[in-house]
């Protein structure tokens, strides 16, 4: 009896994981820095979808590197915040303590 219950719980957890991954893939965030010189688009799984660089920004390589770094980090923060917003309710229903996600 306990084995069946455990198996059901594992199946539910696997299904919930799939739903969460689908929701994360669907999240899209964008970060623009340097007055639009660099724009990074990322999904909720923190996979970069696109990077746009203004041609004038390419003249200063060190500045461009800093802008790319800032845009990627900001996009990652936005992705985390949106993922928490989207999935927070689901995780709360599963008994995951606040702050764990």
Image (cartoon, rainbow, N blue to C red):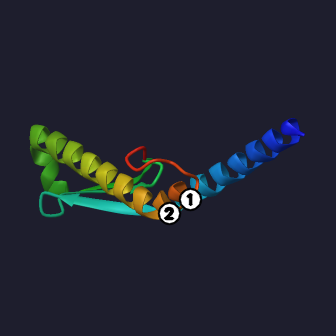
Residue placed under numbered mark 1 in the picture: 93
Quarter of the picture holding the N terminus = top right
Farthest-out residue, front: 1
Residue 58 in the image: above or below residue 25: above
Task: Say which quarter of the image contains residue 52.
Answer: bottom left
Q: Secondary structure at mark 1?
A: helix
Seen at 86% across and 36% down, the residue is 3
Seen at 25% across and 52% down, the residue is 74
Residue placed under numbered mark 2 in the picture: 89
Residue 67 in the image: above or below residue 93: above
Res 24 visible: no
Disc 2 vs disc 1: Cβ atoms closer than 8 Å? yes
Res 51 visible: yes
The image position of residue 9, as x and y in percent, is 75, 46
The image position of residue 4, as x and y in percent, is 87, 41
Seen at 37% across and 55% down, the residue is 79
Question: How many numbered marks, from 0 up?
Answer: 2
Q: Secondary structure at mark 2?
A: helix
Look at discs 2 and 1 and give the one toward the viewer: 1
């Amino acid at each position: 009896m306990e084995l069946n219950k455990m198996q059901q719980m594992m199946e539910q957890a696997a299904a919930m994981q799939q739903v969460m991954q689908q929701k994360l893939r669907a999240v899209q965030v964008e970060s623009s820095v340097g007055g639009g010189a660099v724009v990074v688009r990322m999904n909720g799984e923190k996979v970069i979808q696109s990077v746009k660089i203004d041609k004038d920004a390419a003249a200063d390589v060190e500045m461009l590197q800093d802008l790319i770094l800032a845009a990627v980090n900001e996009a990652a923060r936005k992705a985390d915040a949106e993922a928490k917003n989207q999935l927070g309710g689901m995780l709360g229903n599963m008994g995951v303590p606040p702050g764990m996600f």
